[in-house]
Image (cartoon, helix red, strand yellow):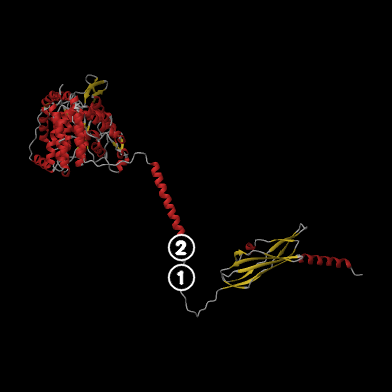
Amino acid sequence: MEITELNEKIKKESEFIDVLFTEVGKAIIGQKDMVERLVIGLLANGHVLLEGVPGLAKTLAIKSLASSMKAKFQRIQFTPDLLPADLIGTMIYNQKEGNFSIKKGPIFSNFILADEINRAPAKVQSALLEAMQEKQITIGEKTFKLEEPFLVLATQNPIEQEGTYPLPEAQVDRFMLKVKITYPTKEEELKIMQQNVSGTLIKINQVVSAEDILNARKLIHEVYVDEKIQKYILDIVFATREPAEYGFDDLTDLISYGASPRATISLAMGARAMAFIKRRGYVIPEDVRAICMDILRHRVAVTYEAEAEEITSEDIIEKILNRVEVP
Amino acid sequence: MVKIKPILLFLFLFIGFELSAQNINITASTDSTNYYVGDYINYKLEIVRDKNVRVELPAVQDSVSNLIFIKELPPKSYKSDSQVVDEYTYVFSKYDSADVIIPSYAVSFSVVGDNYRYSTNVNDVFIAINTLPVDSKAEIMDVKSPLEISFNWIFWGIIFLAVLILAVVGYYLYLYYKKKNAPEGTIKQVVYVPPYKAALKALFGLEEKQLWQKGEIKRYHSEVTEIIRRYFEDEFKVKALEMPSSELLEELKKVRRADEIFDLSRDFFSNADMVKFAKFQPMPSVNETMLKQAFEIVNSTKIEENAETAGEVTNV
C-alpha cells in the first residue's frame, strides 16, 4: 500500500480516536498524556500499569475509557486475601446434578481494571500475569481463550509500601507501558473542583466498539517504520544494555541490566500506535521519543551505586535519548 | 741440731714468690685526683714487665663502668735491656659530682716458655668529681645566644651548582624522551573553521555528488538535513543531531533570529522527514528547493561579521 493511500486510510479509520478522547475528557480533566498512553496500550495490544499517588484519577480514567467502549469491563480490587480463583474462576460442585460446573471469574472481560495490583500476593499476581501473556485461562481441565480485545490496566501506589507485594521485574516486563501520573496543573485542578462540586452526573457514552479497536490494531501493523527508525529504536535499546559501546561510559556503572527484546517490540508497536493516533501512516522519531520513557522506565534496572546517588532509570533513559543521534 | 729442712722449704717458697712478682708490675693512676664535672680524666696504666712477659689487657672501658668512656689514646712503649714499660691512656669523664673509685681489676699475663697463665690485680684509684664553682656575687648573665655560623660560600656554591646541573640534565632528558615518544605526524595545526563555512563547504560537496540525480533521494535528504543540523549544533549550540525535527524547531525559537530560522527550517525539515521516513518520492523541483533552502538557512543565520564573505561564496 502506498504511503498516501495508507495515510488516507488511517485518517479515516482513526476518526474514533478524537471521539474517544472527547468522551473520556468529559470525566478526566487534564492528564492528556495518561489517556493517550491508555489508548496506545489499547491499540498496540499492550497492558498498561499506571503508577501514581492516590487521588489522581487513575481508576476513573480507566473506568471512563472502558465505559466509552461497547465492551465488557470488570474492576477487581486487589487485596491481600484475594485468591487466584477469585480472579480466574473455579469449579463449583452442583449438588443437584452431582457434578462440577465451571464458574468463570471476572477476568473473562475485555477490559480489566486491576486496582492496586501490588496489594495482592504473588500467586494472584501470577495468575493475572499468566492470563495477560497467554490470553487464555485454564480452570480444572478446561482451557478458555480470552475474548479480544483483552486489556489489563493495572494501578499501583508508589507510597505506602508496607503490606504490599511489589511486582517482580519479570512480571513488570509483561506490561507494555508503565505510566507515571503526576498532579494536574492549577487550572486543571480548578476545573476538577468545579466539575465535582456542581453535582452534575457525568455520563460517558459508548462511542467505540470492540470491532473498531480490532480494525485499528490491524491497521497499526501496516504503519510504515523506516529502517532508520528501526535502527534508532535499536540504538536506544542497545544503549541501555551496552552504554560503553555508544560512548556513554558514565552510564556503565549505573545500569544493572538493560531493556529486553520485548522492550524493542513494544517500542516499535508503541511508536506505530502513536503515529496512528497522530493520523500518520508512518513513524517519525518523535513517536519513538514520545513513548520511549513509558516503555523503558520499568525495564531498565539501576545499580546500587545509582540508587545511592539517587539516579533513577528515568534519568538514565533521558540521558540516552539526549545523546543517541536522531535519524 | 737445727732443723734445716723446714727453713730451706720456707726460703724456697719466699724466693720463688719474689721472682714471680718481679716479672711484671702494673700501676694505675690518673692525671689528677680532683676534677670538675665534664672534665676529661686521663686514666693511665703503666706496665713494667720483663721482655719475656706477655700481657693480655682486659677491655678497660668495660671494667671502669662508673665513668663515661670518651676515647683511648695511642699506647706508648719504652724498652731497656731487660725490661719494657708500656703506657696505656684512657680518657673518661663524668657529668655528676661524686667521689669515684676506679675499681681494681685483674690483668692476665704469661711468660714465654711457660704455658701457665698468671694474673695480677691493678690498684684502684680514688678521684673526686666536683661541681663547678659558682660565684654568687657575680652579676647574673643571660643565656648565651646560639653560635652564629658564618655563611659558607663554598658549600652553598657547590649545592647551587649541583642543583643547576641536575636541572639542566633533567630538562634535556625530558626533551629527549618527549621527542622519542612523540608519534610521527601528530603535530597538526587546528584551524578554526566557522560553522557557516563548514556548512557551505559541505553543501557544495553534496551538490557535486548529485545524489538525487542518481536516484539516491533518501540519502540526499538525510545528508542535507544532517549538514543543517550540524550547522545548528555548532552555530547555536543546540543538540540538533540528537533532537527530532519538532523538538529542534522548538529549540530554535530560543536562538537569535528565531522567527527567521523557524520559518525557513519548518518546511525544510518537514519535507525531509517525509522523504526519510514515509517513502515520499518528491518532485525534482523539491529536491532542488531543499538545497536552496539549506543555503538560505546558512546564509541568513550566519554571524554578521562574516556575512559578506559567505555571500560571495554562495554566488560562485
Question: Given the current orientation, which residue lies at the most extreme front position?
Answer: B316
Using the image, name the chain to which the residue with label 2 belongs: B
Q: x, y percentage for residue A131?
A: 24, 26
Residue placed under numbered mark 1 in the picture:
B145
Answer above or below: position of B83 versus A298: below
Using the image, name the chain to which the residue with label 1 belongs: B
Q: x, y percentage for residue A229?
A: 22, 29
Residue placed under numbered mark 2 in the picture:
B153
Same subunit, labels 1 and 2: the answer reads yes
Residue type, numbered disc 2: Trp
Mark 1 crowd level (few <14, some 14–19, many ≥20, 10 Å Cα): few
The Cα atoms of the two marked residues, 1 and 2, are separated by 23 Å
Q: Residue at x 56, y 71 (%)?
A: B37
Residue type, numbered disc 1: Ser
User: In this orientation, does residue A279 appear?
Assistant: no
Secondary structure beneath disc 1? loop
Q: Residue at x 13, y 38 (%)?
A: B262
In the image: residue B126, left or right of residue A44: right
The quadrant of the rendering that contains the C terminus of chain B is top left
In the image: residue A107, left or right of residue B124: left
- Front residue of A320/B276: it is B276
Instruction: Identify the mark nearer the N-term, 1 or 2.
Output: 1
Residue B217's disc is none
Between marks 1 and 2 in the image, the one whose residue lies nearer the viewer: 2
User: In this orientation, does residue A243 appear?
Assistant: yes
- Front residue of A231/B261: it is B261
The quadrant of the rendering that contains the N terminus of chain B is bottom right
Q: Residue at x 89, y 67 (%)?
A: B4
